[in-house]
Image: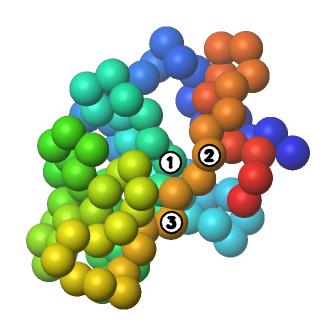
Amino acid sequence: MFHRLIRTLDLYDGLRLPVQIGREELLLIHEDGATWLVQRRCPHGEFPLERASVRGEVLRCPGHGLEFSLSSGQCRGAQGYCLKRYRIDYDGPWIGVSDL
């Protein structure tokens, strides 16, 4: 099932859109023309990531400063933590997610 998140025309750099679908808490991030969909809370300390900074493809948690690759989900410097990523789908002008 396709879950609509946002229209493509509403994307802007710096967007951090928290979304809940069922029990899943997700965060849609748009920065430097790239869009990612990840789990909303840091896998290390459960900090909400909507205040996270993004440089290139690296997300930095506002809680303890851990850095995660948005491409792979891997944590830089702290083995064992991985940011869950979700595949973004498109339906006309909508960005969404199908597989949770």
The residue most toward the right is: 1
Dot 1 falls on a residue whose secondary structure is: strand
Q: Quadrant of the C terminus?
A: bottom right
Tell me which corner region of the image, top left, top right, bottom left or bottom right, holds residue 17. Answer: top left
Can you identify the residue that label 2 sits on? 87
Dot 3 falls on a residue whose secondary structure is: loop
Looking at the rendered structure, the number of numbered marks drawn on it comes to: 3
Query: Does 90 appear above or below 45?
Result: above
Dot 2 falls on a residue whose secondary structure is: loop
40 vs 6, left or right, is: left
35 vs 55, left or right, is: right
Question: Residue 95, image x and y in percent?
Answer: 62, 29
Looking at this view, is 5 or 53 the one in front?
A: 53
**Residue 98 appears in the figure:** yes
Can you identify the residue that label 1 sits on? 37
**Residue 48 appears in the figure:** no
Q: Could you tell me how far apart the alpha carbons at marks 2 and 1 are, in whole angstroms?
A: 7 Å
* Mark 2 touches mark 1? (CB < 8 Å): yes
x 52%, y 57%: residue: 85
Can you identify the residue that label 3 sits on? 84
Instruction: Name the amino acid type tagged 2.
Output: Arg
